[in-house]
Amino acid sequence: MTLTILFWILFFILIYTFIGYALILLLLYQLKRIFFAKKQAQSDTAFEPDVCLFVTAFNEKDYVRQKVENLFSLDYPREKVQYVWVTDGSDDGTPELLAEYETLEIYHQPERRGKMNAMNRGMKYVKAPIVIFSDSNTILSRQTIREVVARFSDPGVGCVAGEKRIVEKKADDAAAAGEGLYWKYESWVKKMDASLNSAVGAVGELFAIRTELFQDVEPDTILDDFIISLRIAQKGFKIAYTPNAWAEETASLNVAEELKCKIRIAAGGMQTIFRLKSLLNPFRYGLLSWQYISHKVLRWTLAPLSLFAIFIVNLLIVMVQQSWMGFDFFSVFLYIQVVAYLLAFTGWILENNRLRFKLLFVPYYFVSMNYASICGMLRYLKGKQSVNWEKSKRA
């Protein structure tokens, strides 16, 4: 009986985290459209405030020219754009290459103290009321600035999250196929979150804030984008989401490289839970707390543990009941798990082969990323996660 109760607890956590929450969001979104429908507000085309395009870089010489030309090509009056680059620790010629562009403001220091320290330092030079953060290895959509600015025409919006896209190829490996599908699903959930109330955080590849809302963040912060955006949400402002402003980058070179990224994110997730512990209180933050716990906290903590624990508990139940060849729920569910892990193993074997059937890699990617979450939790609790990024190699 104890094993059965434990099984259903684990089962509920998994179903709710990976499927149930998204379905509830969809239902609430549809109900909101039916009962609280209102005329769509027209974009204020005359709203053209000054903006700052803010990029932090560490040894990004290979991406500098591509990134700068991309920023210069965005659809917005150039005289209203401030270009700020912060290059703490770069010793590969990145600052010198940036210096070739007169329009750029470059703030370099030889010591590498982490991305958050660089952001804190660089924000002191921002003159525009809106600052748009972007990574040096991403390409922004041409309409990015206009899409972001349009959202800020609503005074209740304090942060705008853009969409992250993975470059699609005809034949992708496990990392590209899994990462691409993951971000499509994540973008959909984020859209539902924002439509219902507020998006839950932003991604560093592309997000924007009102400059006046920025406060220095602890220099050892791992997930700078998440901490900055959610602290603005804690102040009562909404995090808007606009898929028409997107940042595109190539996928990780392979799953091993993607694991490095996901382990760091999971470690940062644990740090975020401790630093934003007040956000776990629904009596204070209401709907935002429910969204935060459902969308992020469970994914970083209980869900990964439940994924692997439920297999062991399920196996023990079948052993106790001696129903190996039965067709009861527990036996069938165990068969499903075995097949899923076999598919994951197959994906691991075929990882470096360029196959068109991308869905074959989904179980492998899913299992690997949940494994990475557990590794990240342990790394953070052991105090072994560095604030400095270890960049993943990309395709």
Image (spheres, rainbow, N blue to C red):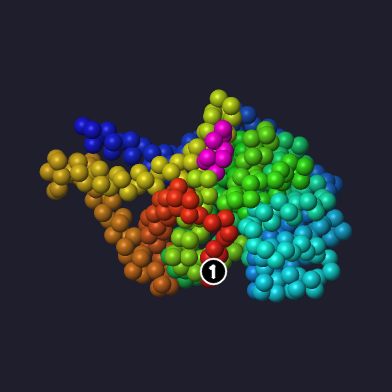
Image spot of residue 96 (x, y percent): 75, 73
Q: Residue at x 61, y 35 (%)?
A: 197
Q: Residue at x 66, y 46 (%)?
A: 217
Q: Is residue 10 left or right of residue 143?
A: left
339 in relation to 201, above or below: below
Q: Nearer the viewer, residue 275 or 187?
A: 275
Q: Quadrant of residue 338?
A: bottom left
The residue pinned by badge 1 equals 394
Span shown in magenta: 272-279
User: Which residue type carries mark 1?
Assistant: Arg
Q: Can you give x and y, in whole percent of width and height, for residue 124 in the image?
A: 78, 51
Percent x, y of residue 88: 69, 63
Q: Is residue 170 left or right of residue 204?
A: left
The answer to whether residue 82 is above or below residue 158 is below
Main SS, magenta region, reads helix
Residue 163 visible within the image: no
Quarter containing the N terminus: top left
Classify residue 130 as left or right of residue 60. right
